[in-house]
Image (cartoon, rainbow, N blue to C red):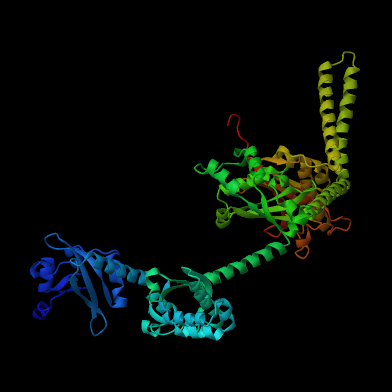
Amino acid sequence: MDDIADLITESLIVRDMQGRITLWNRASERLYGWPPAQALGRSLHMLLATRHLFPMADIEARLPVAGTWVGEVARHAADGRELSVEVRWTLRRDAAGVPVDIVETGRDISALSLLEQETRLAAHRYRNLFQAMAAAFWEMDFSRVRLMIGDLMAAGITDFPRHMAENPDWIVEAMRAVRVVDVNDKAVSLFGATRREEIVGGHVAWCFPPQSRQVFAQSLIAAARRQDRYATETTLTRLDGQPIDVLFTVCWPEEHKGRGHVLVGVIDITERRRAEEETRRSERRYRELFDQMPVALGQLDLRYMNGQLAALYGDRPPPRSEADIDLDFIRDILRNTPVIEVNPRAQQLFRAARREEMLVPIECFWRTRPETVRRTVLARLRGEPGYSEETKVDALDGAQIDVLYTVAFPPSSLERGTNIVAFVDIGDRVAALAKVEQMQAELAHAGRVAMLGEMAASIAHEVNQPLAAIAASGAACLRWLGRTEPDLGEVRDLAGRVVADAQRAAGIIARVRDMAANRRADHVRVNLNELVEEATHFLRHEFQARQVELRFSPTPGPVLVSADRIQVQQVVVNLAVNALQAMAEAGTPVPRLSIAINPVGPDGLCVTVEDNGPGLDPATAPRLFESFFTTKREGLGIGLAVCRSIVEAHGGRMEAGNRADGGGARFWFTLPCLIDTPAGG
């Protein structure tokens, strides 16, 4: 094999798939100056420093598909001479189709004339460009069509557009007169061919559907008017009949005009058109959704805001709280952030007669509540996905509207410099909640008044005790003063007792008046142990009269709570009275009431009231806290409902059930406790 290769006058080199030289004939030695012993086994491109306009790796990557490659490369001989070599590479495969090696034939073209080199280089560049472009390129011979146009001119026809419009068959004939000279690989794949020969040599009538034939006609008119190019978007047909949307461009290179050749470029825009149509459909859907939503929507231009936030916070950590954001900075943003679109519901909500009235800076909608926008900016700077708040906005007529304000921060919208804000009118709900709160306050007041009747005997006893003590102390004072020698020390002690008992009576009456008055809760720091123990004093006479044993277990831990003393005592008294009545009606032999205070969780206190009476009826237990539901013959059914409302207003919760041993009812409620910080802590 090597002897035969040495008889070939051109350079013959074989290299394996790793690029190592396996055959090097004598012509290669003469051309490059390297003897076979120094060439075999070495990398061809490294030995000869092969260079090309395009990377060698890209060219060789196409070999498994194309099978061959022809081109000019620059190389270095062994003595350092620069060589220009025309090479042809052919990929060989084994019987299984696996690539084995690459056979190269080459000839030195360094001695060609400069003009020939330029000509060959231009042709080479044209061929590479023709094949490498992502567009489908056709080279077409229009010489016969030129003769047809000449015949029309000889017949006196000068209005070619009119003639073509009136004679569509002439256009079809002209398309059949065109001959395809060449196509690139992209054209082969785009139009569904498997080989160039399926297109080259034929006409082009098959690829122009009837609705696109005027495009061919317009290209001929452009040529007749000596235009350099003609381009438009149209639809062509593949060999299998499938339509494709394309950008069709025809040009007449100067060097081709004498031969009557034209170049046609075709770029597939099917996906682009689909994307554009999908975009239009999406825009229509967005517009319909935007306009028809029952929520007030506004689109804002955020470019000024984005610039200001980037300038101020671009390289800084986000603010720790809204107080760290200057309110004047927010007002500047409000003055320079315009509304660019609103839906009809927004016009209605903000009292706008026309859409254009709302396309103004958003400052006029946030005059009274700029803090809401400040909190929105804080959420965005912290990287939160959105922000929502119940707030008030200003309508165009000056009215304030209760709304649920919501804004999201999708990155795509922020990058475009726009965003959508939403407003839900909650005016009716706010008004309804105000009515509910008023009704709850009235219900609580009614409960307090109703319980006064049940507590009247105990309260009368409590008031009678200090009054009786006052009377007794006063009588004793008179006796000590009536002696021949008055004992002023005893009189002074008795007078102090009179004052203390009078203050005690005044305190009892003050609590009764507070419970009867419809006043808002006045929360103060109180000791829960003392508060509950004081509540049991109200019922001391009741415990004694009914011979009920009271067990009170205070908690040794933190016991400070923020509470309205009278209301919480009302809860304790009501639960205790209910227990006393239940044990009395059931005839409990040894009635016993236990009140305990225990910590619950990391920051809560639980007050538990247990008795040893009949317990709760499972059938009615779930309804105990319903308003106006009662199991008592004379009850109003509002006591427990009021108690739960009071506890929940203090941030706690109230529950009921039976004791674990089944020996009575168990009611408990929780309150959040306060951690008493030592002075100087």
Which residue is located at x 62 percent, y 54 percent? 419
Q: Position of residue 348 (x, y in %)?
A: 78, 56
| Residue 198 visible within the image | yes
> Which residue is at the front of the view, 233 or 216?
216
Quarter of the image with the C terminus in it:
top right
Is residue 534 placed above or below 245 in the rendered structure? above
> Which residue is at the front of the view, 269 or 512?
269
Is residue 528 placed above or below 150 in the rendered structure? above
Res. 613 image quadrant: bottom right
In the image, is 404 to the left or to the right of 584?
left
In the image, is 398 to the left or to the right of 83?
right
Q: Position of residue 139 (x, y in %)?
A: 40, 76
Which residue is located at x 84 percent, y 16 percent? 488
Q: Position of residue 275 (x, y in %)?
A: 55, 69
In the image, is 41 to the left or to the right of 296?
left
> Which residue is at the front of the view, 400 or 25?
25
Is residue 205 placed above or below 514 in the rendered structure? below
The number of discs equals 0
Quarter of the image with the N terminus in it:
bottom left
Res. 423 image quadrant: bottom right
| Residue 611 visible within the image | no
Res. 472 image quadrant: top right
Is residue 398 placed above or below 64 in the rendered structure? above
Q: Position of residue 473 (x, y in %)?
A: 86, 26
